[in-house]
Amino acid sequence: MTPNYESWSKDELIARLRELEAKKHPKSTHSPTSKKPFHFSSHPKRKIAIKFCYSGWEYNGLAYQNGPTPLPTVEDVLFKAFVKARLVDETGGLDGCGWEKCGRTDRGVSAAGQVVSLWVRSALPTETSSKVTSSPSSEEDLSTEDAPQNTSLQSSAKHELRYVSILNRLLPPTIRVLAWSSISPDFSARFNCKHRHYKYFFTSHGLDVSLMQSAANHLVGEHDFRNMCKLDPGKQITNFHRCVMRAQINPLSPESDGDNRVYVFDLVGSAFLYHQVRHIMAVLFLVGTGVEQPSIIPALMNVFHAESDSSTKSPLPLTALPLMLWDCAYADSDVTWQTDGDGTESGAGSELYHQLHSIHQRSLIHTVLDEHFLTAATQYHSPPPQYFPFSQTGLTPHTLPHSMSGREPVLGVPLGAGTYKRSARYIPLLERNRLDHVDVANERWRIGRGSKYSKQKMPDDGTE
């Protein structure tokens, strides 16, 4: 019989509602937030390498930092994704999973082919996880609770975890995992690397690219690059010899773009010093404008040039935005890169492509918008006089025309990505004041800041 609720009082109606709610949602004896502990020791592990890309301008560099940073670091964000996916044990930190990176990149520097090697959780038995390299065909949710090790589970785990898909679901769009590879237990992302390939993008505005290539040709081979890097006494480096395998400038846009034609400087070497790529590019910009000759490169690599073998003052500091670590190369016997996708429209690889393609499309629209802003401005504002490159204008530092008021002209030496160092006077590199000898700088650090550390930092090959 249905109760006559119309005759019920307010308090009686509220009590009835509470009674019905209690029957509908009975109280659980277990806390809704309690989870079964996850034991990494009960799961098989394997060592893998992952290849990933990231937008450097969004991060405070690649390397994990112990203290606070203005922006997050790539390693910190990436490691947290591994932890959230329960691929590694957070309590062990980077050292606990054998984390090794191929090359360190500083704040603002991007990468399209950075590599990290580490030990991760596997869905395969230990004896087979190091042998299976085929792409998986099924997905596993790594946020599940620790499951018992029984026969049915082992039979369902015949495919490896989808590392690329799992990590990309947890990472921001500015970091994308591209591929992974099974590797041997003694593989090192850093020391097994055969060569590192950097790219620096620039436009030909005010530059003679042919002169820049003539200067770059001197870089190939093994040389002492102490005059084309930033000295970091904390690394205690005494050997500045590095081998450059290729130094080539190539166009990326059609010749019809005029002095806004986009070029890329490809620099390939076994390893690089701190800020070496940017220092080399800074010198090439000076050659391209005409304030330095291509012969400045061999002169800077001759550490006994002029009065002493102390380091020259650094060239102008370039912006990091156009710099990218393009690739880290390994022997085919060391890595076999693979993805989770099956090559179909619904595959994980297809989704990753669509994500990066959308970002590229937005960038093209931004470029067109900026071009129209410039076109609108030229209706009312004239461009400044163009003095560079000297090889095309016929000018020299001593024949620059003065303004109507007699003021010296202001030169704009390119620093990359549309930024310039403006000055009325240029001091040639070999005439600048020299820095202390590297031995003096290293010793000063050892008795100063270095004395506070129990052990010295190891130099990081591939640093930029």
Image (spheres, rainbow, N blue to C red):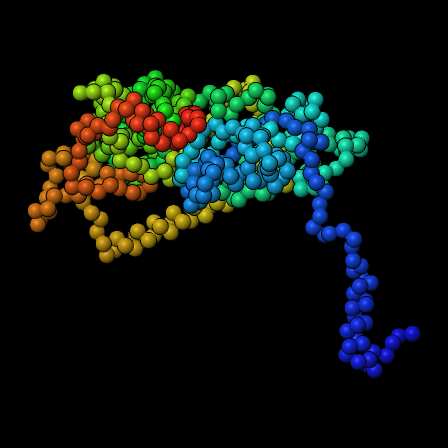
Say left or right for 195 vs 260.
right
**Quadrant (top left/top right/bottom left/bottom right) for the C terminus:** top left
Quarter occupied by residue 162: top right
Whether residue 423 can be seen here: yes
Q: Is residue 56 above or below residue 129?
A: below
Quarter occupied by residue 409: top left
Q: Is residue 156 above or below residue 190?
A: below
> Total label count?
0
Q: Nearer the viewer, residue 10 or 156?
A: 10
Say left or right for 134 vs 444.
right
Q: Position of residue 17 (x, y in %)?
A: 79, 70
Say left or right for 133 vs 376.
right
Q: Position of residue 386 (x, y in %)?
A: 20, 42
Q: Nearer the viewer, residue 308 or 462?
A: 308
Residue at figure coordinates x 30%, y 55% from the top left: 376
- Which residue ends up furthest to the right in the rendered image? 1
Q: Position of residue 276 (x, y in %)?
A: 34, 28
Whether residue 265 can be seen here: no
Quarter occupied by residue 286: top left
Residue at figure coordinates x 67%, y 42% from the top left: 143
**Quadrant (top left/top right/bottom left/bottom right) for the N terminus:** bottom right
Residue at figure coordinates x 80%, y 80% from the top left: 9
Residue at figure coordinates x 36%, y 38% from the top left: 320
Q: Position of residue 18 (x, y in %)?
A: 78, 68
Q: Is residue 387 above or below residue 444?
A: below
Say left or right for 119 vs 316.
right
